[in-house]
Amino acid sequence: MKIRLIAVGTKMPSWVQEGFAEYTKRLPHDCRIELIELPIGPRGKNQPVSKAIEKEGQAMLAAMKPQNTCVALEVLGKPWSTEQLAKQMSGWRMEGQDVDLLVGGPDGLSPKCTQKATQKWSLSPLTLPHPLVRVLLAEQLYRAWTINNNHPYHK
């Protein structure tokens, strides 16, 4: 199974890159996380935010693979516990599904991306900084894998 994290934002601080890399390298070859970074849409006083979100959404839709399960990370999505995430991962693996996880830019996901998603997942009702979301996602995906494989990390 391959999990593709399609995220808006480039040039992340070193702590984000290192944290993300730490958890992704722990996963076995048959459960890989691939990061696809997309540029943030242009914002400015003469540029409406909706245009930036639309541009980001177009880039995300182009990066997605139509055969993959699409999960949008949305504050209004369904919260999953780590154990529920482990069940989701187990289900994706059993179905032979690769997964595209969508993380929007500073103003959220394009409505077209949200509509394309088969599932909407909320990490927290808190507003999280997008760089932190990458590290949090990588750690939780690793933790869910450890649950599914009876690895002691989760304990």
Image (cartoon, rainbow, N blue to C red):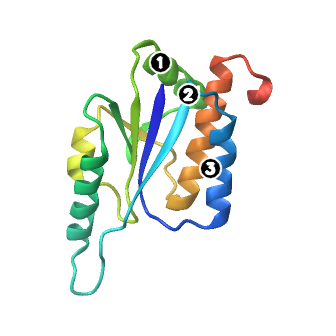
Q: Which residue lies furthest to the front in this view?
A: 29
Q: Residue furthest bottom?
A: 45
- Res 31 label: 2
Q: Which of marks 1 and 2 is nearer the N terminus?
A: 2
Question: In this rendering, is residue 54 above or below 121?
Answer: below
- The residues bearing labels 1 and 3 have C-alpha atoms spaced at a distance of 22 Å
Query: Residue at (67%, 52%) from the top-left corner?
Result: 19
Q: In which quarter of the image is the C terminus?
A: top right
Return the x and y of residue 133 as percentages of the image width and height. Answer: 54, 52
| Label 3 sits on residue | 20
Q: Earlier in the sequence, mark 1 or mark 3?
A: 3
Please indicate whether residue 60 sits to the left or right of residue 32 in the image. left
Disc 3 residue type?
Phe
Task: Evaluate if marks 1 and 2 touch, with contact meaning CB atoms under 8 Å apart.
Answer: yes
Return the x and y of residue 87 as percentages of the image width and height. Answer: 52, 20
Disc 2 residue type?
Cys
- The residues bearing labels 2 and 3 have C-alpha atoms spaced at a distance of 15 Å
